[in-house]
Amino acid sequence: MTQAIHATFTASVTDLKRDPTGTVRAGEGAAVAILNRNAPVFYCVPAATYEAMLERLEDAELNALASARADMPEVPVHLDDL
């Protein structure tokens, strides 16, 4: 069974063991697919890229929540009541 590789850069598990930081750096900020027997077993991403991915996921979740609540009736609130 063929498995898609969702990365421009690839490295073997052996390469990752030999030089973890260099393997991540080879991805130039993008994900590196780590292969075992020519099949991807996981993706290695730099910390900054991972943080950016988490922020985008959170933004998408908040947008979905806002869209779901867009048709709800408004509730008047006065700041003095808070």
Image (spheres, rainbow, N blue to C red):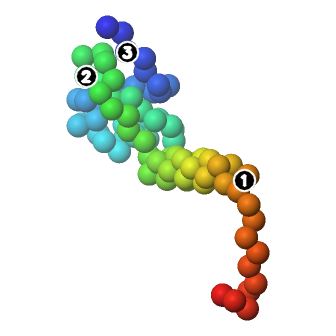
Q: Earlier in the sequence, mark 1 or mark 3?
A: 3
Q: Nearer the viewer, residue 81 or 11?
A: 81
- Mark 1, other Cα within 10 Å: few <14 / some 14–19 / many ≥20: few
Q: Earlier in the sequence, mark 2 or mark 3?
A: 3
Q: What residue would you read off at disc 1?
A: 70
What residue is drawn where x is 30% and y is 16%? Answer: 38
Vertically, is 57 above or below 9?
A: below
Does any portion of residue 63 appear in the rendered image? no
Q: Which mark is residue 36?
A: 2
Q: Where residue 46 sits in the image (x, y, percent)?
A: 44, 46
Q: Where residue 33 sits in the image (x, y, percent)?
A: 39, 29
What residue is drawn where x is 23% and y is 29%? Answer: 14
C-alpha distance separating marks 1 and 3: 40 Å
CB atoms of marks 1 and 3 within 8 Å: no
Residue kind at label 3, given as amino acid type: Gln
Q: What residue would you read off at disc 3?
A: 3
Residue kind at label 2, given as amino acid type: Asn
What residue is drawn where x is 44% and y is 51%? Answer: 47
Q: From the viewer's perspective, tell me whether residue 49 is left or right of residue 36.
A: right
Furthest toward the bottom, the residue is 80
Judge depth for marks 2 and 3 and give the one in front: 3
Q: From the viewer's perspective, tell me whether residue 61 is left or right of residue 33.
A: right
Q: Secondary structure at mark 3?
A: loop
Residue kind at label 1, given as amino acid type: Ala
Judge depth for marks 1 and 3 and give the one in front: 1
Q: Secondary structure at mark 2?
A: strand
CB atoms of marks 1 and 2 within 8 Å: no
Vertically, is 5 above or below 69?
A: above
The C terminus, quarter of image? bottom right
Q: Where residue 37 sits in the image (x, y, percent)?
A: 24, 16
- Mark 3, other Cα within 10 Å: few <14 / some 14–19 / many ≥20: few
Q: Earlier in the sequence, mark 1 or mark 2?
A: 2
